[in-house]
Image (cartoon, helix red, strand yellow):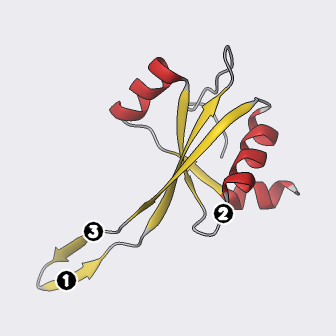
Amino acid sequence: MNEAKLYEVIRAPRVSEKTARLQEVSNQYAFEVSVDATKADIKAAVEKLFDVKVEAVNVVNVKGKNKSFRFRTGRRGDWRKAYVKLAEGQSIDVMTAKV
Protein backbone atom coordinates (compact mmCIF):
# COMPACT_ATOMS: atom_id res chain seq x y z
CA MET A 1 0.00 0.00 0.00
CA ASN A 2 1.55 3.31 -1.04
CA GLU A 3 1.60 6.36 1.24
CA ALA A 4 -1.13 8.26 -0.65
CA LYS A 5 -3.49 5.30 -0.15
CA LEU A 6 -2.68 5.25 3.59
CA TYR A 7 -3.77 8.88 3.91
CA GLU A 8 -6.99 8.11 2.01
CA VAL A 9 -7.86 5.35 4.48
CA ILE A 10 -7.13 7.41 7.62
CA ARG A 11 -8.50 10.92 7.26
CA ALA A 12 -7.94 12.49 10.71
CA PRO A 13 -7.62 11.67 14.41
CA ARG A 14 -10.79 12.37 16.43
CA VAL A 15 -9.92 14.17 19.66
CA SER A 16 -12.56 14.66 22.36
CA GLU A 17 -12.98 14.07 26.07
CA LYS A 18 -14.25 10.56 25.38
CA THR A 19 -11.31 9.64 23.15
CA ALA A 20 -8.82 11.14 25.64
CA ARG A 21 -10.31 8.93 28.37
CA LEU A 22 -10.07 5.88 26.06
CA GLN A 23 -6.38 6.60 25.46
CA GLU A 24 -5.66 6.65 29.20
CA VAL A 25 -7.82 3.69 30.23
CA SER A 26 -7.54 1.14 27.38
CA ASN A 27 -4.85 2.49 25.00
CA GLN A 28 -7.39 3.05 22.22
CA TYR A 29 -7.28 5.83 19.63
CA ALA A 30 -10.10 7.13 17.42
CA PHE A 31 -9.70 8.08 13.76
CA GLU A 32 -12.04 9.31 11.06
CA VAL A 33 -11.62 6.84 8.22
CA SER A 34 -12.77 6.34 4.64
CA VAL A 35 -16.34 5.04 4.26
CA ASP A 36 -15.16 2.05 2.21
CA ALA A 37 -12.12 1.15 4.37
CA THR A 38 -12.04 -2.32 5.92
CA LYS A 39 -10.65 -3.24 9.33
CA ALA A 40 -7.61 -4.81 7.65
CA ASP A 41 -6.98 -1.60 5.65
CA ILE A 42 -7.22 0.51 8.81
CA LYS A 43 -4.89 -1.79 10.76
CA ALA A 44 -2.28 -1.76 7.99
CA ALA A 45 -2.48 2.02 7.58
CA VAL A 46 -2.08 2.77 11.31
CA GLU A 47 0.80 0.31 11.67
CA LYS A 48 2.69 1.81 8.70
CA LEU A 49 1.98 5.49 9.39
CA PHE A 50 2.71 5.49 13.14
CA ASP A 51 5.08 2.48 13.39
CA VAL A 52 3.04 0.76 16.14
CA LYS A 53 1.52 -2.70 16.69
CA VAL A 54 -2.31 -2.77 16.45
CA GLU A 55 -4.18 -5.38 18.50
CA ALA A 56 -7.78 -4.67 17.44
CA VAL A 57 -9.89 -2.38 15.26
CA ASN A 58 -13.55 -1.55 15.88
CA VAL A 59 -15.49 0.46 13.29
CA VAL A 60 -18.61 2.62 13.74
CA ASN A 61 -20.74 4.15 10.98
CA VAL A 62 -21.82 7.62 12.14
CA LYS A 63 -25.02 9.03 10.67
CA GLY A 64 -25.01 12.69 9.62
CA LYS A 65 -27.22 15.12 11.53
CA ASN A 66 -30.10 17.12 10.09
CA LYS A 67 -29.33 20.82 10.42
CA SER A 68 -31.10 24.02 9.44
CA PHE A 69 -29.55 27.32 8.38
CA ARG A 70 -31.72 30.36 7.74
CA PHE A 71 -34.82 28.79 6.25
CA ARG A 72 -33.20 25.82 4.61
CA THR A 73 -32.77 22.36 6.01
CA GLY A 74 -29.79 20.25 5.12
CA ARG A 75 -28.02 17.12 6.17
CA ARG A 76 -24.43 16.59 7.18
CA GLY A 77 -22.70 13.67 5.50
CA ASP A 78 -22.41 10.21 7.00
CA TRP A 79 -18.88 9.24 8.05
CA ARG A 80 -17.00 6.35 9.58
CA LYS A 81 -15.00 6.20 12.81
CA ALA A 82 -12.44 3.58 13.82
CA TYR A 83 -11.33 2.76 17.35
CA VAL A 84 -7.80 1.30 17.22
CA LYS A 85 -6.41 -0.61 20.23
CA LEU A 86 -2.62 -0.64 20.42
CA ALA A 87 -0.34 -3.23 21.98
CA GLU A 88 0.77 -2.71 25.57
CA GLY A 89 3.37 0.03 26.02
CA GLN A 90 2.81 1.69 22.63
CA SER A 91 1.28 5.10 21.96
CA ILE A 92 0.54 7.68 19.29
CA ASP A 93 0.91 11.41 19.90
CA VAL A 94 -2.30 12.53 18.13
CA MET A 95 -1.64 16.23 18.69
CA THR A 96 1.49 16.18 16.53
CA ALA A 97 0.38 13.35 14.21
CA LYS A 98 0.52 14.34 10.55
CA VAL A 99 -2.57 12.73 9.01
Q: Answer with mark 2 or mark 3, whichever residue precedes in sequence.
A: 2
Is there CB contact under 8 Å for labels 3 and 1?
A: no
Q: Residue at x 42, y 70 (%)?
A: 78
Q: Residue at x 74, y 55 (%)?
A: 41
Q: Answer with mark 2 or mark 1, whichever residue precedes in sequence.
A: 2
Is there CB contact under 8 Å for labels 2 and 3?
A: no
Residue extending farthest to the right is 2
Q: Which residue is mark 1?
A: 73
* Pointer 1 local density, CA inside 10 Å: few below 14, some 14–19, many at least 20: few
Spot occupied by residue 18 in the image (x, y as percentages of width and height): 35, 33
Residue extending farthest to the top is 89
* Pointer 3 local density, CA inside 10 Å: few below 14, some 14–19, many at least 20: few
Q: Nearer the viewer, mark 2 or mark 1?
A: 2
Quadrant location of residue 95? top right
Which amino acid lies under the numbered mark 1 shown in the image of this protein? Thr
Q: Answer with mark 3 or mark 1, whichever residue precedes in sequence.
A: 3
Q: Nearer the viewer, mark 2 or mark 3?
A: 2
* Residue 37: mark: 2
In the displayed structure, would residue 63 be above or below residue 23? Answer: below
Quadrant showing the N terminus: bottom right
Which amino acid lies under the numbered mark 3 shown in the image of this protein? Lys
Q: Nearer the viewer, residue 49 or 41?
A: 41
Which amino acid lies under the numbered mark 2 shown in the image of this protein? Ala
Q: CA distance from mark 2 to mark 3?
A: 22 Å
Looking at the rendered structure, the secondary structure element under dot 2 is loop
Q: CA distance from mark 3 to mark 1?
A: 11 Å
Q: Nearer the viewer, mark 3 or mark 1?
A: 3
Quadrant location of residue 17? top left
* Residue 65: mark: 3
